[in-house]
Amino acid sequence: MLDHPVPEVPTAAAAASPAIRLTGLRRHFPGAPAPALDGVSLEVAAGEVFGIVGRSGAGKSTLIRCVNLLERPDAGRVEVLGRDLTAVDAAGLRAARRGIGMVFQHFNLLASRSVAENIAFPLEVARLGWAEREARVAALLPLVGLQAKRDAYPAQLSGGQKQRVGIARALASQPGILLCDEATSALDPETTAEILALLADLRRRLRLTVLLITHEMGVVKALCDRVAVLEAGRVIEQGRVFDVFTRPRAATTRRFVAEVIGDAVPPGTLAALPPPGPGEVRRLLRVLFAGPHGTRAVISEASRRFGLDLNILAGRVDAIGAEPFGIMALAAYGAPAAVEAAIGWMQDLGLTVGPLPEGEG
Ligand SMILES: Nc1ncnc2c1ncn2[C@@H]1O[C@H](COP(=O)(O)OP(=O)(O)OP(=O)(O)O)[C@@H](O)[C@H]1O
């Protein structure tokens, strides 16, 4: 087990102060037509895993690099564990950076150094003695499952093994905060799942605060407690992963979550639906059930009680963390009053019922 400093029991005030607080960050690269960051404010609580998702060019890399000031914002504050890093001197910044580990998409290992030597590298830079470095490396290798690869060189490792080295190196200085810059984007799906499981395990064991950026909602779903969606340098939506996934507000967020939520209506489905019969309406609905019960029983009971035809266009029962949910796209056919009554009945049961968002299908 890694001899990792266990955080002191937080006082009420300390528990309330975030591990990372970004306020009004702006970064406009010279000559660029628009700012990469355009007033980003975020708080990451101690011990949480916070994901930032966005398309290519949204500003994710710039944002995460601002947290340890690899990138200096033009304006705004970067507070880590209560210290404003934009205001500290070079020595203060070096010390603060030792408390912030970083994992990179392309691993950034030194090819001429063995696994153990790569992991020890930041400790050499920090001028730790040999015995202490050896002890840290010996504790980290089993933690990332690389005991057998101690003396191997990066060229002899798979992508997943390389990233395990990258993670161990990031943890070598026993940081409380881990930044992950697209840590699984260069890996295949199976290896991605292994690395995500490793990060989840390490986060729990070492009580890490994790800030990660990704363009994959699957990563957010697997690992994060909260998520922010970045678009054109701005946060357009943020919240608990469960809430953002099940009730996305922005169109961009809906497109992102559709990848993993699986309630997207297959193309052409709506055009192929029959028209409503005489005296009937057709309502296209999105029904969300958050809780331990399935949606299907509710749907069939609504159909019987209100004499409706309910055509399921897409749907899925899933869970985010320990929170199960069911989500469905429906075409409801029936008398107008009966359709309204059925919607009211489902809402009374605690389901969220709304129109199918524009552009579906
Ligand atoms: N060093 C730089 N000089 C000039 N422009 C830059 C620089 N770094 C980033 N940019 C620009 O800033 C914007 C945001 O880039 P950034 O890399 O932060 O986005 P991203 O969301 O991480 O994208 P990706 O997923 O493709 O890496 C882009 O328009 C990019 O071209």
Image (spheres, grey):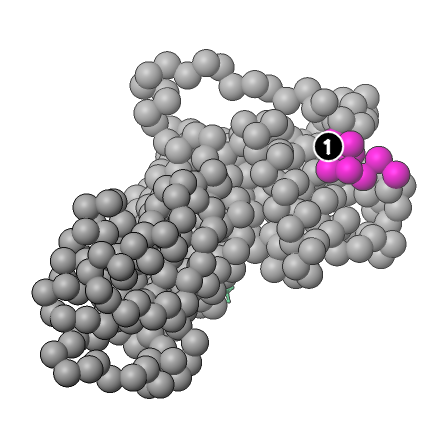
* Amino acid of disc 1: Leu
167 horizontally vs 322: left or right:
right
| Residue at the spot 33% in from the left edge and 58% down from the top edge | 300
- For the residue pair 168 and 238, the one nearer the viewer reads as 238
| Residue at the spot 19% in from the left edge and 51% down from the top edge | 345
Instruction: Report if residue 312 lies within the magenta region.
Output: no
For the N terminus, which image quadrant? Answer: top right
Q: Position of residue 96 (x, y in %)?
A: 51, 32
In the rendered image of this protein, does residue 239 appear above or below residue 201?
A: below
For the C terminus, which image quadrant? Answer: bottom left
Res 177 visible: yes
- For the residue pair 166 and 75, the one nearer the viewer reads as 166
- For the residue pair 73 and 196, the one nearer the viewer reads as 196
Q: State the residue position of label 1.
A: 143
Highlighted range, magenta: 140-148
| Residue at the spot 27% in from the left edge and 49% down from the top edge | 351
Q: Position of residue 222 (x, y in %)?
A: 53, 47
Q: Position of residue 346 (x, y in %)?
A: 23, 52
| Residue at the spot 80% in from the left edge and 55% down from the top edge | 158
- For the residue pair 156 and 118, the one nearer the viewer reads as 156
89 horizontally vs 160: left or right:
left
Res 59 visible: no
In the rendered image of this protein, does residue 166 appear above or below residue 358?
A: above
348 horizontally vs 247: left or right:
left
Instruction: Report if residue 146 lies within the magenta region.
Output: yes
Q: Position of residue 306 (x, y in %)?
A: 20, 60
Q: Quadrant of residue 121?
A: top right
Secondary structure at numbered mark 1: helix
State whether the magenta stretch is mostly helix, strand or loop.
Answer: helix
